[in-house]
Image (cartoon, rainbow, N blue to C red):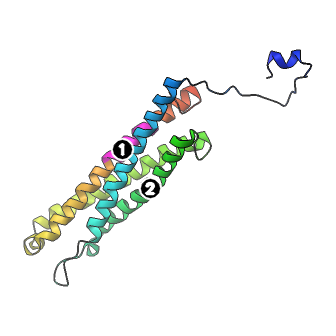
Amino acid sequence: MRSPQAFRNGDTPSPHHRNPTPHFHNTVTLRKLRRFNSLIFVFRVTAFTFSLASSVFMATNSRGSGSPRWFDFDAFRFVFAANSIVALYSLFEMGVSVWEISTGATLLPEILQVWFDFGHDQVFAYLLLSADSAGTALAKTLKGKDTCTASNSFCVQSDISVALGFAGFLFLGLSSLLSGFRVACFIINGSRFHL
């Protein structure tokens, strides 16, 4: 809908022209939004760091020909794969967060971006939780056998990798909560912003 000023200047309204009203944001609101987006960015960087560290610890967990290797165990392969996938996803989302902080706009259309972030955060958080739970069960089983007595460093490094994966899950879960908050704001307000 055109402004009353346009009607006074002799313009005729077009039935096909719609002028959506943009969201008004004052300076305080913009600072709060930037802080909120920065918090999401920090959670994504932390999830990336822990998942990458977990993948590296698992990939380097081979001590020689006589000791066990991580890729001989299905659960440890699952831990490695899940943490690698989450590290790549978190790297992508870090780029999206930087884009959103610097430009103030989403990379995808807003509705797609909100649901993309929330859906993928949920899926990858549960993937990471599942993989690390399987890795924990295997590590506990190996401690009861001769594997950990013969090669203690293998078991310690496996435990570290699984623990780092759980830390990555924690921060991915926190970013999932924030992206869920953005979905709720989008459903209620029609915008990803709560203000």
Image location of residue 24, percent across then percent down: 61, 24
Q: Which residues are magenta?
A: 170-179
Is 13 displayed left or right of 132 in the figure?
A: right
Is 180 displayed left or right of 143 in the figure?
A: right
Q: How many marks?
A: 2
Crowding at label 1, few (<14), some or many (≥20) Cα neighbours within 10 Å?
many
* Residue that label 1 marks: 173
| Residue 45 covered by magenta stretch | no
Image location of residue 140, percent across then percent down: 15, 61
Determine whether the residue tagged by mark 2 lies in a helix, strand or loop: helix
Residue 155 vs residue 30, the one in the foreground: 30
Residue 195 shows in the view: no
Residue 91 sits in quarter: bottom left
Residue 184 shows in the view: yes
Q: Amino acid at mark 1?
A: Gly
Residue 88 vs residue 6, the one in the foreground: 6
> Could you tell me how far apart the alpha carbons at marks 1 and 2 are, in whole angstroms?
16 Å
Image location of residue 100, percent across then percent down: 53, 42
Residue 106 sits in quarter: top right
Residue sitting at x 37%, y 60%: 82
Determine whether the residue tagged by mark 1 lies in a helix, strand or loop: helix
Residue sitting at x 31%, y 55%: 50
Q: Compared to 56, does 40 lie above or below?
A: above
Q: Disc number at residue 91?
A: 2
For the N terminus, give its image quadrant: top right
| Residue 177 covered by magenta stretch | yes
Q: Compared to 169, does 141 lie above or below?
A: below
Crowding at label 2, few (<14), some or many (≥20) Cα neighbours within 10 Å?
some
Q: Earlier in the sequence, mark 1 or mark 2?
A: 2
Q: Amino acid at mark 2?
A: Leu
Q: Disc number at residue 87?
A: none
Image location of residue 92, percent across then percent down: 48, 55
